[in-house]
Image: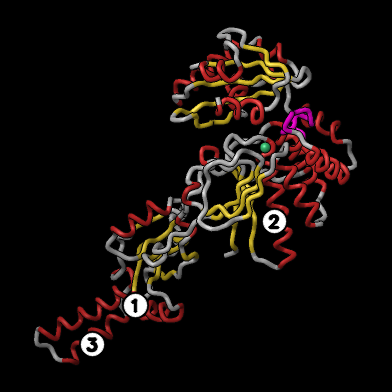
Amino acid sequence: MMRQIMVMGHRNPDNDAICSAVGYAWLKGELARRQGIDVSYVPVRLGPLPPETKGIFEKWGIEPPLVIHNIYARVSDVMTPDPVCIAGSACILDAGRLLRRHNVRALVVVDEAGTYLGLITTRMIAERYIAATDVLEEGATQMAVAADLIESLDQRVDTLMETDVLEMRPDDRLDEAAADLMESSLREAVVLDESRRPIGIVTRSDIAVRPRRQVILVDHNETTQAATGIQEAEVVEIVDHHRVGDISTSSPIKFMNLPVGSTATIVAQECEASGVEVPPAIAAALLSAIMTDTIVMKSPTSTPTDSHAAAYLAGILGVEPEAFGMEVFALRGSDSTMSAADLVSADSKEYALGEKTILISQHETVDLAGVLAREAEIRAVMRELLESKGYEFVLLLATDILAEGSQFLLEGNPHTVNHAYSIVCNPEGGNWMPGILSRKKQVAGRILEA
Ligand SMILES: [Mn+2]
């Protein structure tokens, strides 16, 4: 099977997390093809597509990455697929021939429709032969034993097969399945599909070495923002533009972390440096991500490197970067059709603040008054999150792209935010914070250091 490396962005994916995964998976695949390396790079995402991403993907015919919920190793990662099968009505002689021809120790027994019935192994056949010697002990002649053995060659497989076999599904978590197999009396388990057809065999030796899924992280490098099970995976590369977090690796890896406006900028830079010909769809996805992360280059996180990358991608598309950016924001749709829950959660990030966890959400808008008109509804959602997740506080930045500032709405303990900005958080109406556009540069860091 071709080695597969997943390229994934953070939880609650934003446009940059998804487009950078798509763009970087494409670039790595292209480079691997050039070098004749047999690896496939698969972009995945940990949540729904933001509306602007959906719009861009539809317009440019980009396949949305697969959604995954965790990256635990699965039974399908270790099973031997396409097991050798034998009909229940076949005889032991046939079974013996199949075992020898395929050089395996177990056959899956199926009925005429191909449905799973049981398992027949070399050990079961050997036991049948050893049982024949019982006749000898009872004083029978060697001829009688030989006759019994000859007879057994015609015996039906389904009279000898084991039916008490551990059954697995390909998507079962490997750690749990492995524990079950160690406790099972047989050293093999069968893997069945939904219609109970055998699709694989797992033996104890298959689980002796636990495989680790290989992943490339883009747009994050912190455990709390990564897929569940990240500790079990092997992180082989990181491309990011956030603070250095807590992901650790056992071997040296390529870790590209730059203080630029978007991860897509770094991906674009890599494309340019490697001299590949970027297809327009990939250029559009990457450019859209630069534009959303830098709020059309207005955010203080935006650097000359971002402008350069945007110009490079816009050149491929024959567009003007800022105009393209405004079109991307227009794809987000209006705030009035967005639920308060989406408005609070669509772009929210958890951070560890000492022993506590905080949530900082951001909603970028061109209609701040419209958002604030729904304050009561929004605060109710924030309080619900605060209680259900046990956050120290939930802070929403309602960012006005045109006025270039953010309204802070806070639920929970305001102490840290009050202290960080020398303000008193208003429990009603919130606080207008002019010039604050970047959660990362102007909010998260400041709060974590306060
Ligand atoms: Mn980003």
Specify the amino acid type for callout 2. Answer: Lys
Whichever of labels 1 and 3 marks the residue nearer the N terminus, that label is: 1
Query: Which residue is located at x 67 percent, y 43 percent?
Result: 64
Q: Position of residue 407 (x, y in %)?
A: 66, 15
Q: Which residues are magenta?
A: 291-301
Whichever of labels 2 and 3 marks the residue nearer the N terminus, that label is: 2
Determine if the magenta segment contains residue 298. yes
Could you say which quadrant of the image residue 374 lies in? Answer: top right
Whichever of labels 1 and 2 marks the residue nearer the N terminus, that label is: 2
Q: Quadrant of the N terminus?
A: bottom right
Q: How many marks?
A: 3
Residue 113 visible at all: no
Specify the amino acid type for callout 1. Answer: Ile
Query: Which residue is located at x 70 percent, y 57 percent?
Result: 29
Secondary element under disc 2, as helix, strand or loop, is helix
Residue at the spot of label 2: 28
| Mark 2: few/some/many CA within 10 Å (<14, 14-19, 20+) | some
Query: Which residue is located at x 62 percent, y 25 percent?
Result: 443
Question: In 3D space, how far apart are the residues under numbered discs 1 and 2 (Cα atoms)?
Answer: 51 Å
Secondary element under disc 3, as helix, strand or loop, is helix
Q: On the picture, is 82 further left or further right than 396? A: left
Main structural element of the magenta stretch: helix, strand or loop? loop
| Rendered image coloring scheme | secondary structure
Residue at the spot of label 1: 92
Question: Is 65 situated above or below 90?
Answer: above
Could you say which quadrant of the image residue 428 lies in? Answer: top right
The mark found on residue 147 in the picture is: 3
Question: Is 139 situated above or below 118?
Answer: below
Question: Is 99 situated above or below 82?
Answer: below
Query: Which residue is located at x 9 percent, y 83 percent?
Result: 138
